[in-house]
Amino acid sequence: MSAQQGLDNKEQDQEKTIADYLRTHPDFFSRHTQLLSTLKIPHYAGDAISLVEYQVAALREQKKRLERELKNLITVARDNDQLSKCMHRLTVALMETVTLNDIVQVIQESLRNDFNADTVSLRLFIENLDDLSSLPENIVCERNDPSVSEFEKILKESKPVCGKFRQSQIEFLFDSHQEEIKSAALIPLSGTTYTGILAIASHDKDRYHTGMGTLFLQYIGDLLSCTLRPFIEEKTHE
């Protein structure tokens, strides 16, 4: 059965109309060159594929690749735009805080609601806890506490780290939630008299991984470090 015989009457009429139009408008593809990369136009050269067919196939594949890359760029741009809005909301909220408890509440709510974190933990390592008795006990410890050595490398490099971590680190940061943690991002915090870790965790093992970008995590760390300094360092200098 030929291709023409396989068409119903309606399709045959449509093809005839198209063929008649192209016949009377031979410059159609000159005015619509973008269509050529999407059409399959045979160019017979015996059993071998012709150079024209090869070039057209290559151009068609290139077009598909460029379309995929453009789609990915658009997705990344939209994600970054959304993250920028979330960062703006977090910045404004932190500027309105008046106590350390306010800061802890704002950072936890923002990371859960805007940044899709399942669990958030803040730990501050402070030189002299006697001067900071008003701080929430569950987020502070002495800087010389043995547990702090677990994070020495992260604190020294001052860069967010993502992926999976030692069980001892997870236990220290997330305590009762440790069994639910499958991946995490650890953000170092720093000041003159203190250091710290902001930990963001997920129940998804692939949510935070070693190959992901950390630019916005670094922004969050810098922002939180600056917000904490007046609440901690002014007390230690009284």
Image (cartoon, grey):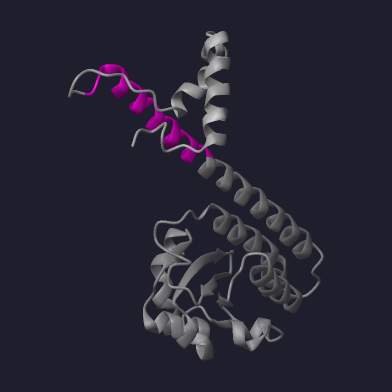
User: Can the viewer see residue 25 in this picture?
Assistant: no
The image quadrant where one finds the C terminus is bottom right
Residue at the image point whose x is 68% and y is 70% from the top: 113
Q: Main secondary structure of the magenta part?
A: helix
What is the x, y in percent for residue 236?
66, 74
Q: Relative to residue 126, is residue 23 depicted above or below?
A: above
User: Which residue occupies 40% across, 29% down?
Assistant: 60
Q: Is residue 63 left or right of 43 when viewed as pictured?
A: right
Q: Is residue 69 magenta?
A: yes
At x 38% / y 83%, what residue is drawn?
A: 167
Quarter occupied by residue 194: bottom right
Whether residue 204 is in magenta: the answer is: no
- Residue under the point 72% across and 76% down: 105
Q: Is residue 96 left or right of residue 194?
A: right
Q: Residue 157, image x and y in percent?
A: 42, 59
> Up-down: is 132 above or below 10?
below
Please tell me which residue lies in front, 175 or 232: 175
Instruction: List x then y, in percent, for residue 122.
Output: 59, 76
Relative placement, left or right, of 57 versus 80 is left
Q: In terms of image quadrants, where is residue 126?
A: bottom right
In the image as oriented, which residue stretches furthest toward the left? 47
**Who is closer to the viewer here, 166 or 148?**
166
Residue 166 pos. (x, y %): 36, 78
* Near-viewer residue (116 or 88): 116
Q: Quadrant of the N terminus?
A: top left
For the record, the magenta segment spans: 49-70
Residue farthest to the bottom, as pictured = 176
Query: Looking at the image, is 34 positioned above or below residue 93?
Result: above
Q: How many marks?
A: 0
Q: Nearer the viewer, residue 14 or 187?
A: 14
Q: Can residue 124 be seen at all in this image of the molecule?
A: yes
